[in-house]
Image: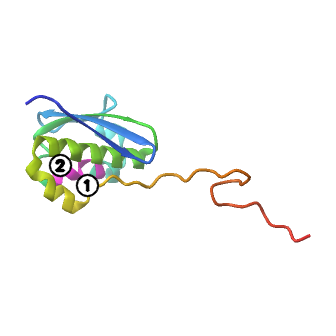
Amino acid sequence: MEVVNAIGRRKAAVARVYVKEGNGKITINKRDLTNYFPSSILQYVVKQPLTTLNVAEQYDIQLNLFGGGFKGQSEAARLAITRALIKINPDSKPALKAEGFTTRDPRAVERKKPGRPKARKRFQFSKR
């Protein structure tokens, strides 16, 4: 099997993933998954599509992550892995879609408006 690649985004984070047959090693920016995401919750988020399909030990995954924070990066990685798994086996799409992994979360930071301190915050009102 050749290398399958996909891309995932969340907020300002972008994840490019390269999936090939292997024994379940996940590398992020040339570091191990447990080093890059010390939090077990974020490790779980990245592995969700693999555990849903019970293929965690079948593929080696190499991720390039940049932008955003660790939460956005982990969710971008999840979307990228999901898209790569669907490219490998289109029959797995209904199971991943049922879990909600195929949907790109469109929420992003609202832009700052002119004449305001932040996007919606206003300066303090003074009556006199």
Residue at 63 percent across and 55 percent down: it is 119
Q: Nearer the viewer, mark 2 or mark 1?
A: 1
Whole-number angstrom distance, CA of label 2 to CA of label 1: 11 Å
Percent position of residue 115, x then y: 74, 52
Query: Which residue shows up at 67% across the image and 60% down it?
Result: 121
Q: Position of residue 61 (x, y in %)?
A: 21, 36
Q: Nearer the viewer, residue 49 or 92?
A: 92
Q: Quadrant of the C terminus?
A: bottom right
Circle 2 crowding by C-alpha within 10 Å: few under 14, some 14–19, many from 20: many
The residue pinned by badge 1 equals 101
Question: Which amino acid type is marked by label 2?
Answer: Leu
Dot 2 corresponds to which residue?
50
Residue at the far front in the pictured view: 114
Q: Is residue 36 left or right of residue 118?
A: left
Tell me where the magenta segment starts and ends, as one range: 45-52
Rendered location of residue 85, percent (x, y): 16, 44
Q: Is residue 118 left or right of residue 71?
A: right
Counting from the top left corner in percent of width and height, residue 91 is at 8, 51
- Could you say whether the residue bearing mark 2 is in a helix, strand or loop? helix
| Residue 63 magenta | no
Amino acid type, residue under disc 1 in the picture: Phe
| 87 vs 41, nearest the viewer | 87
